[in-house]
Structures are given as structure tokens and as C-alpha cells.
Image: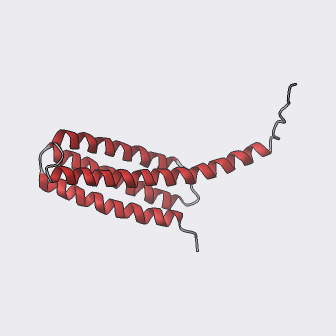
Amino acid sequence: MLRTVARPSRTFLPLLALALASCSSSETVDQQSKLAASTGQAAVLMSDAWLSGAAPSRYASSALQSFAETLVAAGRQVESTSSSDPAKRDALAAAISRLSNAANRAKGAVEAEQHAQAGQAQQELLAAQGDLATAYRRYFSPER
């Protein structure tokens, strides 16, 4: 026995698309922000491991490069979402970009075997993590 599927009305489809877009946008921002936070923490831990001599330069450099690329992709995802408050979305994307830049600086310092610069990049990573946490709280805080 064949079943027929009712076709949604033409007025219903735009409403459904809008509802799905708004849900996925917020979820995407949430997921990418959390990915950025954990990736930033991994970059801090890797730079710490290299600074303490527990990780070889080649491995640390490769890992930091991978972290920076992940952060760039997360930032692009956040930037591309629609938002009712673009300024808050842009603040999140900027914090993720700062994390990526700091991871790249850490990578460069590791490659150059410059411990002082790696330590400075690690401090930049920590500061950018704080910026990300603040931007995340502001993005998801209810309006007053």
C-alpha cells in the first residue's frame, strides 16, 4: 500500500527554514566557541609541555599549527552565522582569532627555539581564552 506524503504549504516552508536557521545558528556558535576554548587550552598545554622539555619541538610545532588551523575554521564558522546581535558574534569571532594568532606565535617561537617568545605566546593564549570566555558569556546572556 502506498502512502502519500502531504506537501507543506508554500507559506510554511519559509517559516520552517527560518526556525531551523535560528536554531542551528545558535548551536553552531555554541559548538564552535566550545571547540575554540578546548583547542586554546590544548595549545596552552602543548606550549607548556614544550617549555618544560616534555615535548619535542617538531611535535609541538605541528600540534600548534593544527590548533591554529582549527581555531581559524571555528572563527569562520562563527563569523558566517546569522545573529540578532552581530556585535556580540563579532566579539566572539575576534576572541577566537586572537587565540589562533597566539597559537601561530607559539608555533613560530617553538620552531625558532625561542623560549621567551613561547612563554609570551602562552600568556597571549591565556589572555585570549579569558576574552573568549567573556565574549561567550555576553553572547549567551539574556538581554536586560
In the image, residue 79 above or below residue 66: below
Q: Nearer the viewer, residue 127 or 94?
A: 127
Left or right? Give the position of 68 relative to 26.
left
Left or right? Give the position of 20 relative to 6.
left
Total numbered labels: 0
Please tell me in which quadrant of the rendered image residue 131 appears. Answer: bottom left
Identify which residue is drawn at 57% across, 69% down.
Answer: 142
Q: Nearer the viewer, residue 100 or 90?
A: 100
In the image, residue 104 above or below residue 135: above
Q: Position of residue 49 (x, y in %)?
A: 20, 51
Q: Position of residue 114 (x, y in %)?
A: 12, 50
Identify which residue is drawn at 84% across, 36% down.
Answer: 6
Q: Position of residue 77 (x, y in %)?
A: 48, 46
Left or right? Give the position of 137 relative to 11.
left
Q: Give the position of the C terminus as an image quadrant.
A: bottom right
Left or right? Give the position of 15 relative to 120.
right
Q: Give the position of the N terminus as an image quadrant.
A: top right
What colour scheme governs how the chains and residues are painted in the rendered image of this protein?
A: secondary structure
Residue extending furthest toward the right: 1
Residue extending furthest toward the bottom: 144
Identify which residue is drawn at 63% across, 48% down.
Answer: 21
Q: Position of residue 35 (x, y in %)?
A: 42, 50
Please tell me in which quadrant of the rendered image residue 34 appears. Answer: bottom left
Identify which residue is drawn at 11% across, 46% down.
Answer: 113
